[in-house]
Image: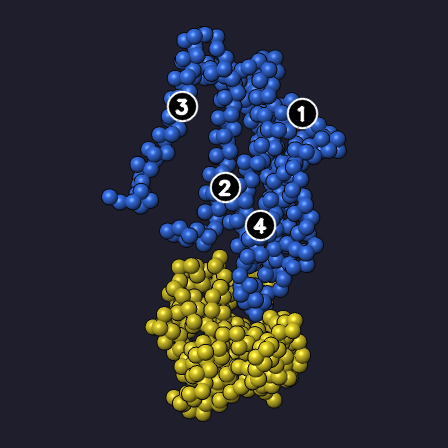
Amino acid sequence: MRRLLNIRPHGGGRILLGLVPLLAVALFYLVASEARHAQNIHDKLLPTASAMVEAVKMMATVDPLTGQAPLLVDTAASLKRISTALVIATGITLILGLVIGLLPMMKAGMGPLVAAVAVIPPIAILPVLFIVFGLGEVSKIALIVIGITPVMVRDLAAHVGAIPKEQLIKAQTLGASTWQTALRVALPQAMPRLFMAVSLALGPAWVFLISAEAIAADVGLGYRIFLVRRYLSMDIIIPYVIWISLLAVLMDVALTMISRRAFPWAYPKGGQ
Amino acid sequence: MALLDFSNVWVEYGDKVVLEQVDLSIEAGAFVSIVGASGAGKSTFLRLALGQERPTRGSIWLDGEPLLQEPGPDRGVVFQRYSVFPHLSARDNVVFGLDCAGSPLLGRLSGARRRAAVAEAEAMLEAVGLGDAVNVFPAQLSGGMQQRLAIAQALIKKPRILLLDEPFGALDPGSRLDMHELITKLWREHGLTIMMVTHDIKEAFKLGTRVLAFDKRRRDPQAPHRYGSTAVYDFPLDKKDAVIPDELTQMTAR
Protein backbone atom coordinates (compact mmCIF):
# COMPACT_ATOMS: atom_id res chain seq x y z
CA MET A 1 0.00 0.00 0.00
CA ARG A 2 1.48 3.36 -1.04
CA ARG A 3 1.61 6.16 1.45
CA LEU A 4 -1.14 8.74 1.17
CA LEU A 5 1.37 11.53 0.65
CA ASN A 6 2.72 9.84 -2.50
CA ILE A 7 -0.59 9.54 -4.32
CA ARG A 8 -0.92 12.40 -6.83
CA PRO A 9 -4.03 13.08 -8.93
CA HIS A 10 -3.41 13.55 -12.67
CA GLY A 11 -5.27 15.21 -15.56
CA GLY A 12 -9.01 14.59 -15.42
CA GLY A 13 -8.88 13.20 -11.90
CA ARG A 14 -7.35 16.44 -10.71
CA ILE A 15 -10.12 18.56 -12.24
CA LEU A 16 -12.77 16.18 -10.90
CA LEU A 17 -11.31 16.37 -7.40
CA GLY A 18 -11.47 20.16 -7.59
CA LEU A 19 -15.07 20.15 -8.85
CA VAL A 20 -16.47 17.78 -6.23
CA PRO A 21 -16.36 20.20 -3.26
CA LEU A 22 -17.72 23.07 -5.36
CA LEU A 23 -20.63 20.95 -6.60
CA ALA A 24 -21.22 19.61 -3.09
CA VAL A 25 -21.58 23.15 -1.73
CA ALA A 26 -23.96 24.09 -4.57
CA LEU A 27 -25.99 20.92 -4.05
CA PHE A 28 -26.17 21.48 -0.30
CA TYR A 29 -27.49 25.00 -0.93
CA LEU A 30 -30.14 23.80 -3.39
CA VAL A 31 -31.37 21.11 -1.01
CA ALA A 32 -31.53 23.57 1.90
CA SER A 33 -33.30 26.13 -0.28
CA GLU A 34 -35.88 23.50 -1.38
CA ALA A 35 -36.47 22.50 2.21
CA ARG A 36 -37.14 26.08 3.33
CA HIS A 37 -39.40 26.79 0.36
CA ALA A 38 -41.39 23.61 1.10
CA GLN A 39 -42.30 25.17 4.45
CA ASN A 40 -42.72 28.76 3.23
CA ILE A 41 -42.88 29.61 -0.47
CA HIS A 42 -42.07 33.26 0.30
CA ASP A 43 -38.79 32.44 2.04
CA LYS A 44 -36.23 35.18 1.32
CA LEU A 45 -33.22 33.78 3.17
CA LEU A 46 -32.24 30.99 0.74
CA PRO A 47 -33.65 32.03 -2.66
CA THR A 48 -34.02 29.32 -5.31
CA ALA A 49 -31.73 29.22 -8.35
CA SER A 50 -34.54 30.40 -10.63
CA ALA A 51 -35.27 33.36 -8.35
CA MET A 52 -31.61 34.38 -8.47
CA VAL A 53 -31.56 34.10 -12.31
CA GLU A 54 -34.65 36.35 -12.41
CA ALA A 55 -33.01 38.87 -10.10
CA VAL A 56 -29.81 38.95 -12.17
CA LYS A 57 -31.88 39.48 -15.34
CA MET A 58 -33.66 42.35 -13.66
CA MET A 59 -30.38 43.93 -12.50
CA ALA A 60 -28.81 43.50 -15.95
CA THR A 61 -31.66 45.19 -17.86
CA VAL A 62 -31.89 48.94 -18.26
CA ASP A 63 -34.02 50.58 -15.60
CA PRO A 64 -36.42 53.03 -17.36
CA LEU A 65 -36.22 55.39 -14.35
CA THR A 66 -32.44 55.84 -14.42
CA GLY A 67 -31.73 54.72 -17.99
CA GLN A 68 -29.01 52.38 -16.71
CA ALA A 69 -28.60 48.68 -15.94
CA PRO A 70 -27.53 48.52 -12.27
CA LEU A 71 -25.27 45.46 -12.64
CA LEU A 72 -23.30 47.09 -15.45
CA VAL A 73 -22.85 50.52 -13.87
CA ASP A 74 -21.98 48.93 -10.51
CA THR A 75 -19.36 46.69 -12.13
CA ALA A 76 -17.90 49.55 -14.17
CA ALA A 77 -17.70 51.86 -11.13
CA SER A 78 -16.12 49.25 -8.87
CA LEU A 79 -13.62 48.05 -11.47
CA LYS A 80 -12.60 51.63 -12.21
CA ARG A 81 -11.98 52.32 -8.51
CA ILE A 82 -10.06 49.12 -7.83
CA SER A 83 -7.95 49.27 -11.00
CA THR A 84 -7.04 52.92 -10.45
CA ALA A 85 -6.01 52.08 -6.89
CA LEU A 86 -4.03 49.02 -8.03
CA VAL A 87 -2.16 51.04 -10.65
CA ILE A 88 -1.25 53.75 -8.12
CA ALA A 89 -0.25 51.21 -5.46
CA THR A 90 1.84 49.23 -7.96
CA GLY A 91 3.66 52.36 -9.11
CA ILE A 92 4.48 53.44 -5.55
CA THR A 93 5.52 49.90 -4.66
CA LEU A 94 7.85 49.60 -7.62
CA ILE A 95 9.70 52.82 -6.85
CA LEU A 96 9.81 52.52 -3.04
CA GLY A 97 10.47 48.78 -3.11
CA LEU A 98 13.45 49.25 -5.41
CA VAL A 99 15.07 52.15 -3.59
CA ILE A 100 14.51 50.67 -0.11
CA GLY A 101 15.70 47.25 -1.19
CA LEU A 102 18.72 48.51 -3.07
CA LEU A 103 20.00 51.57 -1.21
CA PRO A 104 21.06 51.08 2.43
CA MET A 105 20.51 54.79 3.09
CA MET A 106 16.90 54.64 1.89
CA LYS A 107 16.33 51.51 3.92
CA ALA A 108 17.53 53.31 7.05
CA GLY A 109 15.49 56.40 6.17
CA MET A 110 12.22 55.03 4.82
CA GLY A 111 12.02 51.57 6.38
CA PRO A 112 10.64 52.66 9.78
CA LEU A 113 8.04 54.96 8.16
CA VAL A 114 6.74 52.17 5.92
CA ALA A 115 6.72 49.76 8.87
CA ALA A 116 4.75 52.28 10.96
CA VAL A 117 2.19 52.99 8.23
CA ALA A 118 1.78 49.25 7.64
CA VAL A 119 0.44 48.61 11.15
CA ILE A 120 -2.30 51.28 10.97
CA PRO A 121 -5.65 49.55 10.35
CA PRO A 122 -6.74 51.29 7.12
CA ILE A 123 -10.45 51.23 8.01
CA ALA A 124 -9.62 53.22 11.14
CA ILE A 125 -8.44 56.16 9.05
CA LEU A 126 -11.39 55.98 6.64
CA PRO A 127 -13.13 58.84 8.52
CA VAL A 128 -9.97 60.92 8.08
CA LEU A 129 -10.04 60.21 4.35
CA PHE A 130 -13.71 61.17 4.12
CA ILE A 131 -13.00 64.43 5.96
CA VAL A 132 -9.93 65.27 3.88
CA PHE A 133 -10.98 64.04 0.44
CA GLY A 134 -14.78 64.24 0.76
CA LEU A 135 -17.16 61.42 -0.04
CA GLY A 136 -16.20 61.16 -3.73
CA GLU A 137 -14.01 58.74 -5.63
CA VAL A 138 -10.69 59.99 -4.20
CA SER A 139 -11.31 58.80 -0.65
CA LYS A 140 -12.31 55.29 -1.81
CA ILE A 141 -9.25 54.94 -4.03
CA ALA A 142 -7.06 56.41 -1.27
CA LEU A 143 -8.37 53.82 1.21
CA ILE A 144 -7.41 50.94 -1.08
CA VAL A 145 -4.00 52.46 -1.84
CA ILE A 146 -3.23 53.08 1.84
CA GLY A 147 -4.52 49.65 2.73
CA ILE A 148 -2.42 47.58 0.33
CA THR A 149 0.69 49.63 -0.50
CA PRO A 150 2.75 49.28 2.72
CA VAL A 151 2.58 45.48 2.68
CA MET A 152 3.46 45.41 -1.02
CA VAL A 153 6.39 47.80 -0.50
CA ARG A 154 7.79 45.73 2.37
CA ASP A 155 7.45 42.54 0.36
CA LEU A 156 9.14 43.94 -2.72
CA ALA A 157 11.89 45.68 -0.72
CA ALA A 158 12.63 42.40 1.07
CA HIS A 159 12.76 40.59 -2.26
CA VAL A 160 15.09 43.17 -3.83
CA GLY A 161 17.20 43.14 -0.65
CA ALA A 162 17.54 39.36 -1.03
CA ILE A 163 19.19 39.60 -4.46
CA PRO A 164 22.56 37.90 -3.84
CA LYS A 165 25.29 40.39 -2.97
CA GLU A 166 27.49 38.61 -5.50
CA GLN A 167 25.23 39.78 -8.32
CA LEU A 168 25.37 43.42 -7.25
CA ILE A 169 29.16 43.29 -6.92
CA LYS A 170 29.46 41.54 -10.25
CA ALA A 171 27.39 44.31 -11.84
CA GLN A 172 29.76 46.91 -10.40
CA THR A 173 32.80 45.07 -11.71
CA LEU A 174 31.12 45.20 -15.11
CA GLY A 175 31.00 48.97 -14.82
CA ALA A 176 27.35 49.41 -13.81
CA SER A 177 26.41 52.61 -11.95
CA THR A 178 23.79 52.62 -9.19
CA TRP A 179 21.19 53.66 -11.74
CA GLN A 180 22.22 50.97 -14.23
CA THR A 181 22.22 48.34 -11.48
CA ALA A 182 18.72 49.36 -10.44
CA LEU A 183 17.47 49.43 -14.02
CA ARG A 184 19.09 46.30 -15.43
CA VAL A 185 19.67 44.03 -12.42
CA ALA A 186 17.15 44.86 -9.67
CA LEU A 187 14.12 46.03 -11.69
CA PRO A 188 13.80 43.00 -13.98
CA GLN A 189 14.22 40.62 -11.04
CA ALA A 190 11.64 42.59 -9.03
CA MET A 191 8.97 42.41 -11.74
CA PRO A 192 7.72 38.82 -11.23
CA ARG A 193 7.57 39.45 -7.49
CA LEU A 194 5.66 42.69 -8.10
CA PHE A 195 3.04 40.78 -10.09
CA MET A 196 2.78 38.29 -7.24
CA ALA A 197 2.46 41.09 -4.69
CA VAL A 198 -0.41 42.61 -6.71
CA SER A 199 -2.09 39.20 -6.90
CA LEU A 200 -1.87 38.77 -3.15
CA ALA A 201 -3.10 42.33 -2.59
CA LEU A 202 -6.26 41.72 -4.65
CA GLY A 203 -8.07 40.17 -1.67
CA PRO A 204 -7.48 43.08 0.73
CA ALA A 205 -8.11 45.56 -2.12
CA TRP A 206 -11.62 44.16 -2.62
CA VAL A 207 -12.26 44.26 1.14
CA PHE A 208 -11.35 47.95 1.29
CA LEU A 209 -13.35 48.71 -1.86
CA ILE A 210 -16.52 47.06 -0.58
CA SER A 211 -16.10 48.75 2.82
CA ALA A 212 -15.73 52.19 1.32
CA GLU A 213 -18.64 51.64 -1.05
CA ALA A 214 -20.83 50.33 1.77
CA ILE A 215 -20.30 53.47 3.83
CA ALA A 216 -20.48 56.23 1.23
CA ALA A 217 -21.31 55.69 -2.43
CA ASP A 218 -24.22 55.90 -4.85
CA VAL A 219 -23.03 53.27 -7.27
CA GLY A 220 -20.79 50.19 -7.07
CA LEU A 221 -21.00 46.49 -6.28
CA GLY A 222 -20.45 47.04 -2.55
CA TYR A 223 -22.96 49.87 -2.47
CA ARG A 224 -25.61 47.66 -4.13
CA ILE A 225 -25.34 44.68 -1.82
CA PHE A 226 -25.53 46.91 1.24
CA LEU A 227 -28.49 48.77 -0.31
CA VAL A 228 -30.59 45.70 -1.08
CA ARG A 229 -29.74 44.24 2.35
CA ARG A 230 -32.50 46.52 3.67
CA TYR A 231 -35.02 44.50 1.66
CA LEU A 232 -33.47 41.14 2.62
CA SER A 233 -32.83 40.60 -1.12
CA MET A 234 -30.63 37.55 -0.86
CA ASP A 235 -31.55 36.78 -4.49
CA ILE A 236 -29.48 39.84 -5.49
CA ILE A 237 -26.79 39.66 -2.81
CA ILE A 238 -25.72 36.08 -3.53
CA PRO A 239 -25.25 36.55 -7.32
CA TYR A 240 -23.41 39.81 -6.65
CA VAL A 241 -21.03 38.07 -4.23
CA ILE A 242 -20.42 35.29 -6.77
CA TRP A 243 -19.81 37.94 -9.45
CA ILE A 244 -17.30 39.78 -7.22
CA SER A 245 -15.44 36.53 -6.52
CA LEU A 246 -15.40 35.73 -10.22
CA LEU A 247 -13.95 39.16 -11.06
CA ALA A 248 -11.27 38.71 -8.38
CA VAL A 249 -10.35 35.25 -9.67
CA LEU A 250 -10.18 36.51 -13.28
CA MET A 251 -7.86 39.38 -12.27
CA ASP A 252 -5.64 36.94 -10.40
CA VAL A 253 -5.46 34.51 -13.33
CA ALA A 254 -4.75 37.36 -15.76
CA LEU A 255 -1.87 38.66 -13.62
CA THR A 256 -0.31 35.21 -13.32
CA MET A 257 -0.59 34.61 -17.06
CA ILE A 258 0.96 37.98 -17.96
CA SER A 259 3.81 37.38 -15.52
CA ARG A 260 4.54 33.90 -16.90
CA ARG A 261 4.48 35.19 -20.45
CA ALA A 262 6.62 38.26 -19.76
CA PHE A 263 9.22 36.71 -17.41
CA PRO A 264 9.81 33.14 -18.59
CA TRP A 265 13.18 32.99 -16.78
CA ALA A 266 11.37 33.27 -13.42
CA TYR A 267 9.34 30.13 -14.09
CA PRO A 268 11.81 27.36 -14.94
CA LYS A 269 10.26 24.30 -16.58
CA GLY A 270 9.38 21.65 -14.04
CA GLY A 271 8.74 24.14 -11.26
CA GLN A 272 11.05 25.94 -8.88
CA MET B 1 56.29 48.54 -10.46
CA ALA B 2 53.97 45.69 -9.48
CA LEU B 3 50.40 45.62 -10.70
CA LEU B 4 48.82 45.30 -7.28
CA ASP B 5 50.54 46.35 -4.04
CA PHE B 6 49.46 45.64 -0.47
CA SER B 7 51.41 47.75 1.99
CA ASN B 8 51.09 46.87 5.70
CA VAL B 9 47.38 46.08 5.36
CA TRP B 10 45.30 45.24 8.46
CA VAL B 11 41.65 44.25 8.65
CA GLU B 12 39.91 44.32 12.03
CA TYR B 13 36.26 43.79 12.99
CA GLY B 14 35.93 45.39 16.41
CA ASP B 15 38.68 43.80 18.49
CA LYS B 16 38.93 40.76 16.21
CA VAL B 17 41.95 40.95 13.94
CA VAL B 18 41.37 39.12 10.64
CA LEU B 19 44.42 40.14 8.62
CA GLU B 20 47.61 41.69 9.96
CA GLN B 21 50.69 43.11 8.33
CA VAL B 22 49.95 41.97 4.80
CA ASP B 23 52.80 43.15 2.56
CA LEU B 24 52.52 41.70 -0.92
CA SER B 25 53.09 42.65 -4.52
CA ILE B 26 51.31 40.96 -7.37
CA GLU B 27 53.16 41.16 -10.70
CA ALA B 28 51.31 41.57 -13.98
CA GLY B 29 50.79 38.22 -15.72
CA ALA B 30 50.96 36.20 -12.51
CA PHE B 31 48.50 33.44 -11.60
CA VAL B 32 48.38 33.67 -7.82
CA SER B 33 46.68 30.86 -5.90
CA ILE B 34 45.61 31.67 -2.36
CA VAL B 35 45.15 28.80 0.09
CA GLY B 36 44.52 28.56 3.80
CA ALA B 37 42.25 26.94 6.35
CA SER B 38 38.65 28.11 6.72
CA GLY B 39 38.58 31.47 8.46
CA ALA B 40 42.21 32.22 7.63
CA GLY B 41 41.20 35.42 5.89
CA LYS B 42 41.89 34.40 2.32
CA SER B 43 38.45 35.51 1.13
CA THR B 44 38.83 38.74 3.10
CA PHE B 45 42.10 39.29 1.26
CA LEU B 46 40.31 38.82 -2.08
CA ARG B 47 37.51 41.16 -1.02
CA LEU B 48 40.16 43.81 -0.28
CA ALA B 49 41.46 43.55 -3.83
CA LEU B 50 37.87 43.69 -5.07
CA GLY B 51 37.15 46.84 -3.11
CA GLN B 52 34.23 45.18 -1.34
CA GLU B 53 36.05 45.64 1.94
CA ARG B 54 38.38 48.39 3.18
CA PRO B 55 41.59 47.90 5.08
CA THR B 56 41.47 49.18 8.67
CA ARG B 57 45.11 50.21 8.31
CA GLY B 58 47.56 50.26 5.43
CA SER B 59 47.04 50.92 1.75
CA ILE B 60 46.45 49.08 -1.50
CA TRP B 61 47.74 50.29 -4.86
CA LEU B 62 46.64 49.25 -8.33
CA ASP B 63 48.99 50.34 -11.12
CA GLY B 64 50.59 52.86 -8.77
CA GLU B 65 47.25 54.52 -7.98
CA PRO B 66 45.41 54.08 -4.67
CA LEU B 67 42.81 51.34 -5.16
CA LEU B 68 39.25 52.62 -5.50
CA GLN B 69 37.36 51.57 -2.36
CA GLU B 70 34.48 50.01 -4.27
CA PRO B 71 34.23 47.38 -7.00
CA GLY B 72 35.01 48.71 -10.46
CA PRO B 73 35.50 47.56 -14.05
CA ASP B 74 39.30 47.33 -13.67
CA ARG B 75 38.87 44.26 -11.46
CA GLY B 76 36.80 41.33 -12.75
CA VAL B 77 35.37 38.73 -10.42
CA VAL B 78 33.92 35.21 -10.48
CA PHE B 79 32.30 33.90 -7.30
CA GLN B 80 31.50 30.31 -6.43
CA ARG B 81 27.79 30.99 -7.04
CA TYR B 82 25.36 33.75 -8.08
CA SER B 83 27.86 35.36 -10.45
CA VAL B 84 25.49 35.56 -13.41
CA PHE B 85 22.19 37.36 -13.85
CA PRO B 86 19.32 34.84 -13.88
CA HIS B 87 16.99 37.10 -15.89
CA LEU B 88 19.35 37.56 -18.84
CA SER B 89 20.23 35.08 -21.58
CA ALA B 90 23.87 33.97 -21.82
CA ARG B 91 24.41 36.50 -24.60
CA ASP B 92 22.85 39.39 -22.67
CA ASN B 93 24.83 38.43 -19.57
CA VAL B 94 28.03 39.03 -21.53
CA VAL B 95 26.76 42.09 -23.40
CA PHE B 96 25.82 43.66 -20.03
CA GLY B 97 29.34 45.00 -19.42
CA LEU B 98 29.41 46.67 -22.83
CA ASP B 99 25.87 48.02 -22.34
CA CYS B 100 26.91 49.74 -19.11
CA ALA B 101 29.95 51.39 -20.67
CA GLY B 102 28.14 52.54 -23.83
CA SER B 103 24.76 53.64 -22.50
CA PRO B 104 24.84 55.42 -19.13
CA LEU B 105 21.14 56.31 -19.14
CA LEU B 106 19.35 53.26 -20.53
CA GLY B 107 22.04 50.70 -19.68
CA ARG B 108 21.32 49.16 -23.06
CA LEU B 109 22.97 49.70 -26.42
CA SER B 110 20.97 49.87 -29.63
CA GLY B 111 21.48 49.81 -33.36
CA ALA B 112 24.93 49.26 -34.85
CA ARG B 113 26.71 49.56 -31.49
CA ARG B 114 24.46 46.84 -30.08
CA ARG B 115 25.21 44.58 -33.04
CA ALA B 116 28.95 45.12 -32.57
CA ALA B 117 28.63 44.38 -28.84
CA VAL B 118 26.63 41.22 -29.53
CA ALA B 119 29.25 40.01 -32.01
CA GLU B 120 31.99 40.62 -29.43
CA ALA B 121 29.98 38.83 -26.74
CA GLU B 122 29.29 35.84 -28.98
CA ALA B 123 32.98 35.54 -29.83
CA MET B 124 33.75 35.53 -26.09
CA LEU B 125 31.09 32.88 -25.44
CA GLU B 126 32.61 30.82 -28.24
CA ALA B 127 36.02 31.14 -26.58
CA VAL B 128 34.73 29.72 -23.28
CA GLY B 129 32.87 26.91 -25.04
CA LEU B 130 29.34 28.31 -24.83
CA GLY B 131 28.94 29.04 -28.55
CA ASP B 132 25.84 26.82 -28.71
CA ALA B 133 24.13 28.28 -25.66
CA VAL B 134 23.89 32.01 -26.41
CA ASN B 135 20.10 32.16 -26.07
CA VAL B 136 19.84 30.06 -22.93
CA PHE B 137 18.98 31.40 -19.47
CA PRO B 138 21.48 30.55 -16.68
CA ALA B 139 18.96 28.30 -14.87
CA GLN B 140 19.11 25.93 -17.84
CA LEU B 141 22.93 25.75 -17.73
CA SER B 142 24.92 23.26 -15.65
CA GLY B 143 27.12 24.53 -12.81
CA GLY B 144 30.26 24.33 -14.95
CA MET B 145 28.61 26.15 -17.83
CA GLN B 146 27.39 28.89 -15.47
CA GLN B 147 30.98 29.42 -14.32
CA ARG B 148 32.14 29.55 -17.96
CA LEU B 149 29.50 32.22 -18.52
CA ALA B 150 30.66 34.16 -15.44
CA ILE B 151 34.24 34.11 -16.77
CA ALA B 152 33.18 35.28 -20.23
CA GLN B 153 31.12 38.04 -18.61
CA ALA B 154 34.15 39.25 -16.63
CA LEU B 155 36.66 39.00 -19.50
CA ILE B 156 34.58 41.14 -21.88
CA LYS B 157 35.60 44.17 -19.75
CA LYS B 158 39.31 43.30 -20.16
CA PRO B 159 39.99 43.72 -16.42
CA ARG B 160 43.51 44.51 -15.18
CA ILE B 161 43.17 41.63 -12.74
CA LEU B 162 40.72 38.73 -12.51
CA LEU B 163 39.66 37.68 -9.02
CA LEU B 164 38.31 34.15 -8.56
CA ASP B 165 36.69 33.21 -5.23
CA GLU B 166 36.60 29.40 -5.08
CA PRO B 167 35.31 29.41 -8.65
CA PHE B 168 35.34 25.63 -9.09
CA GLY B 169 34.44 24.64 -5.52
CA ALA B 170 30.85 23.63 -6.33
CA LEU B 171 31.68 21.63 -9.47
CA ASP B 172 32.03 17.87 -9.90
CA PRO B 173 35.59 16.58 -10.46
CA GLY B 174 35.12 16.10 -14.21
CA SER B 175 33.96 19.63 -14.99
CA ARG B 176 36.58 20.95 -12.57
CA LEU B 177 39.32 19.48 -14.77
CA ASP B 178 37.70 21.02 -17.86
CA MET B 179 37.61 24.37 -16.12
CA HIS B 180 41.31 24.08 -15.18
CA GLU B 181 42.12 23.63 -18.85
CA LEU B 182 39.90 26.55 -19.84
CA ILE B 183 41.23 29.03 -17.27
CA THR B 184 44.86 28.13 -18.10
CA LYS B 185 44.15 28.62 -21.80
CA LEU B 186 42.44 31.99 -21.23
CA TRP B 187 45.20 33.11 -18.88
CA ARG B 188 47.84 32.43 -21.56
CA GLU B 189 45.90 33.76 -24.54
CA HIS B 190 44.65 36.97 -22.93
CA GLY B 191 47.77 37.62 -20.84
CA LEU B 192 45.61 37.81 -17.70
CA THR B 193 46.62 38.48 -14.14
CA ILE B 194 44.65 36.16 -11.86
CA MET B 195 44.18 35.86 -8.10
CA MET B 196 42.32 32.69 -7.14
CA VAL B 197 41.16 31.64 -3.69
CA THR B 198 40.77 27.88 -3.38
CA HIS B 199 40.31 25.15 -0.79
CA ASP B 200 41.97 22.61 -3.03
CA ILE B 201 45.73 22.74 -2.53
CA LYS B 202 46.41 20.50 -5.53
CA GLU B 203 44.43 22.89 -7.69
CA ALA B 204 46.43 25.81 -6.26
CA PHE B 205 49.75 24.23 -7.26
CA LYS B 206 48.50 22.94 -10.60
CA LEU B 207 47.22 26.29 -11.85
CA GLY B 208 49.27 28.91 -10.07
CA THR B 209 52.60 30.51 -10.85
CA ARG B 210 52.73 31.55 -7.22
CA VAL B 211 51.01 30.16 -4.16
CA LEU B 212 50.18 32.25 -1.10
CA ALA B 213 49.18 30.45 2.09
CA PHE B 214 47.32 32.44 4.74
CA ASP B 215 47.56 31.55 8.40
CA LYS B 216 48.21 33.12 11.78
CA ARG B 217 51.85 33.79 12.48
CA ARG B 218 51.27 34.07 16.24
CA ARG B 219 48.65 32.58 18.50
CA ASP B 220 47.35 33.74 21.86
CA PRO B 221 45.60 30.79 23.56
CA GLN B 222 43.61 33.13 25.82
CA ALA B 223 42.50 35.50 23.07
CA PRO B 224 42.92 33.81 19.68
CA HIS B 225 41.04 36.60 17.92
CA ARG B 226 43.66 39.20 18.80
CA TYR B 227 46.14 37.92 16.22
CA GLY B 228 45.26 38.00 12.52
CA SER B 229 46.38 35.98 9.54
CA THR B 230 48.91 36.94 6.94
CA ALA B 231 50.65 35.28 4.04
CA VAL B 232 52.90 32.90 5.95
CA TYR B 233 54.11 31.03 2.87
CA ASP B 234 54.82 32.55 -0.49
CA PHE B 235 55.97 30.06 -3.11
CA PRO B 236 56.98 31.20 -6.56
CA LEU B 237 56.52 28.19 -8.83
CA ASP B 238 59.08 28.26 -11.61
CA LYS B 239 58.17 24.90 -12.97
CA LYS B 240 55.00 22.89 -13.03
CA ASP B 241 54.49 19.78 -10.88
CA ALA B 242 56.39 21.32 -8.00
CA VAL B 243 56.32 19.24 -4.83
CA ILE B 244 53.74 20.40 -2.31
CA PRO B 245 55.48 20.93 1.04
CA ASP B 246 54.20 18.66 3.81
CA GLU B 247 53.71 21.46 6.32
CA LEU B 248 51.39 23.25 3.89
CA THR B 249 49.28 20.14 3.34
CA GLN B 250 48.88 19.82 7.09
CA MET B 251 48.06 23.47 7.53
CA THR B 252 45.25 23.56 4.99
CA ALA B 253 43.85 20.26 6.18
CA ARG B 254 43.27 21.70 9.62
Q: Chain of mark 1?
A: A
Marked residue nearer the N-terminal end (2 or 4): 4
Q: Please tell me whether mark 3 sits on a helix, a strand or a loop.
A: helix
Q: At label 2, which amino acid type do we have?
A: Leu
Residue B155 in picture, x, y percent from top left:
50, 73
Quadrant of the rendering where the N terminus of chain A is positioned: top left
Q: How is the image coloured?
A: by chain
Q: Quadrant of residue A222?
A: top right
Disc 4 marks a residue whose amino acid type is Leu
What residue is disc 3 on? A26
Q: Quadrant of residue B8?
A: bottom right
Report how far apart the C-alphas of labels 4 and 3 lie in the structure.
39 Å
Q: Colour of chain A?
A: blue
Q: How far, Cα to Cα, is label 1 from label 2?
A: 30 Å
User: Are there few (<14), some (14-19), or many (20+) residues within 10 Å of tag 3?
Assistant: few
Which secondary structure lies at badge 4?
A: helix
Q: Which residue is mark 1?
A: A216
Q: Residue at x 64, y 58 (%)?
A: A103
User: What colour do you see for chain B?
Assistant: yellow
At 53% from the left and 61% from the top, the residue drawn is A164
Q: Earlier in the sequence, mark 3 or mark 1?
A: 3
Q: Which mark is residue A156?
A: 4
Q: Mark 1 or mark 2, which has the lower sequence index?
A: 1
Q: Label 2 is found on which chain of the structure?
A: A
